[in-house]
Image (cartoon, rainbow, N blue to C red):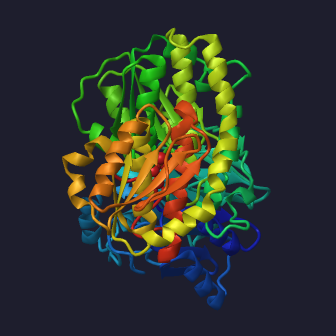
Amino acid sequence: MCGIIGAVAQRNVVPILLEGLRRLEYRGYDSAGLVVINKGLQRVRSTGRVAELAAQIGRQKTHGHLGIAHTRWATHGGPTEDNAHPHVSTNSIAVVHNGIIENHEALRTRLKSLGYDFASETDTEVIVHLIHFYYQASRDLLVAVRAAVAELQGAYAIGVVSAEAPHQLIAARRGSPLLIGVGIEENFIASDVSALLPVTQRVIYLEDGDIADIGLLGIRIFDAEGRPVERGEHVSELSADMAELGNYRHFMQKEIHEQPRAIADTLLAGVTTHSVLPGIFGPQAEDVLGKINGVRILACGTSFHAAKVAEYWIESLAGLPCRAEVASEYRYRNSVADPDTLILTLSQSGETRDTIDALIQAKKLGHKHSLAICNVPESALVRASELKFLTRAGPEIGVASTKAFTTQLVALFLLALVLGRLHGRVSVAQEKSWLDQLRELPGLVGQALALEPEISAWAERFADKHHALFLGRGAHYPIALEGALKLKEISYIHAEAYPAGELKHGPLALVDKDMPVVAVAPNDTLLEKLKSNLQEVRARGGELYVFADQDSHFSEQDGLHLLRLPSHAGPLSPIVHTVPLQLLAYHAALCKGTDVDKPRNLAKSVTVE
Ligand code: G6P
C-alpha cells in the first residue's frame, strides 16, 4: 500500500514519475503527489487519482532532473491534500514513504518541542522533520537519513531529496519493498519493478536496513550497520507492455483472459512429460518435502481461498494433514507447533504484512521448514522462506486478484503431486496421468472464458440486487468463497458463501426471490447431494444460477438458470469453475458502473496490519 518512485536523470523526470505512479496506482489511490528539484523544491499534490495530479502538473508545467513521487492509501489521516505525500520540512527536504511509523507520536512530540510545525496528520511527516533536524548538524543528506531512520520503529521504504543536493536521491527500506532501477547516466527507485519498466529492466533489490545514495553515475549501498555492500543486479523478465491495458476495458478483464497463458507458463516452470521436478520448489525441496509430516498454509484474502482448496488436494493426494489459516489470526495465536509441519505461505505480492508476520510467528513457534508460493520474485516473503515457487502470472494490476489465484492453484496442485510421490501415495503412472490433465487445463479455462456473453447477461440480473449467496461443496466450497469475495469487492453487492450442506443450518432463512443463489455444481461425487440442497432453495422461492459441467444431468426449469462449463475436470475442476465466477463479478460491476480495477477503500498490496 502506497507506491513510491524517484528518479535522478539528465532529462526531465516528471513524465517518468507520472508513468511510474500510474503503474503503482494499484497500491493505493487516495491521493498522489510529487516533488522535483528545480531552483528549490517544487511540489504538486492532489487528492484522488494520478490522472488528476497529471492534469495539475500539465497546467503548471512542472519539470526537473531529480524528483520523488507517491500514490497513497491512507492510514494516518484522511485522504486530503495536506496528508498527501511528498512531505517537506522547511521547504528544503522532501520525503515519500510507504509503511507505518509506530513511534510517530513520541517523535512528533519531540520534534514539536524542537520547533517543527506539522502540516499533516500523517506518521510520515516525522521522518522528514527528523532528517531535517540531523541535516542541520551534518549538512550531509546521507548522514542525516541514516541518523533519522535509526530512530524509526515500524516499517518504511522512503525516497528523500534535498533542494541543496540537486543530483542526489537517497533511498532506505525496512519492512516495506523498495528497489533501485539502473539506467545509463540515470537511476531510479520504485516500490515495484513494473513502475520502472518503461525506463529500465535492470534492478537492484534493497535488503532490510539498507540505505542507498543514488546519483546520475553511481549508486552506493550501505547495510544496516553502515557498511558499504554490493547487492546483485537482476534483469527483470517483465516487459513494459505486460502492464498495459491493450484492447481491454479493465485490467481485471485482461487478467481474467490471460489465465490460459498464465497457467501454461506456470506449468512450464518444471514439469516434464512424466513428472513434476521437486526442484521447482528449491534445491533442498526433495529432502525437505520428503520428511515433513503435514502442511499448514497461511495466507490472506484470495490467497487464503487458494489455500482452502489445497487442504482438499494435499490431504487426498498426499495423505498429509493440511490446514489453511488466515494469516492475521494465526500471527496472534499460540498454536501448537509441530516442527516437522511445513509452513506454506501463499501470496500474490509477497509483501502482505500479516502473511509475513505469520511466517515469523511460525518460525518463532519452532516450525523448521517454510515454502512460499508467490508471484513476485525477490519479495520479502520469498526471501524469508526456505523453499519457494514463483507463479508465472505476470504483473497483476487489478486490485481483485484473478490470474494470481488460478496460478496459485496450479502451483498447489503440483505441490500436492510432489508430496504424494515423495510420501508414496502417487505412483509414476498416476503422476503422468495428472500431468496430462494439467496440460489440458489452459484449453478448459479457455472454454470457460467463452461463456462470457451468457454470464454477462446473467450479471444484468444481479445489478439491482443487494445480496447474493454462493454455494459449493468439497473443494468447490472455497471457490464459492472466492466467487462471493469477487462480487463484493468490485460490485459492492453483499455476498456470502456457504458449504451447500450448511444452508439448512441458518442461511436458508435469507432465501427469497430477491436473493440470487449461485451454485458451483461440478459433476463430482457430491453432485446429487448438492442437487438436494438446491431443491431446498427452490422450494423457498429462491432463484438459482447454476454452473454445471457439460456431462452432468441438469435441466433448466423455473427458477433455475443453467450454464454449462466443459466436461468435469476431476480434481482440477475448482480451477475451471473459478473462471465464470470472476466473469460474473466483473460484469455485475460493469452494470453497476463501479471502478472495477480500483474498488473503493481497497488496495492490492496490504503492507499494514
Ligand atoms: C489484498 C488484495 C487481495 C489479496 C490480499 C492478499 O486484500 O486486495 O486481492 O488477495 O490482499 O494479498 P497477497 O498479495 O498476499 O496475495
Question: Taking 252 as reference, is 152 left or right?
Answer: left
Q: Nearer the viewer, residue 219 or 511?
A: 511
Locate residue 373, reporting x and y percent: 52, 35
Q: Residue at x 65, y 30 (%)?
A: 437
Q: Residue at x 59, y 79 (%)?
A: 51
The quarter of the rendered structure image containing the N terminus is: bottom left
Q: Quadrant of residue 233?
A: top right
Locate residue 428, reporting x and y percent: 63, 11
Question: Taking 11 as reference, is 148 left or right?
Answer: left
Q: Nearer the viewer, residue 424 or 52?
A: 424
Task: Determine whether 46 is above or below 196 in the image.
Answer: below
**Which residue of the protein is positioned furthest toward the top in this rendering?**
424
Q: Would you say residue 160 is visible in this rendering?
A: no
Locate residue 75, reporting x and y percent: 35, 64
Q: Nearer the viewer, residue 337 or 247?
A: 247
**Which residue of the protein is positioned furthest toward the bottom in this rendering?**
59
Q: Residue at x 55, y 60 (%)?
A: 398
Q: Residue at x 62, y 65 (%)?
A: 453
Q: Quadrant of residue 461?
A: bottom left
Question: Taking 536 as reference, is 523 left or right?
Answer: right
Task: Determine whether 530 is above or below 598 in the image.
Answer: above
Locate residue 228, reporting x and y percent: 59, 39
Q: Quadrant of residue 355?
A: top left
Q: Would you say residue 23 is visible in this rendering?
A: yes
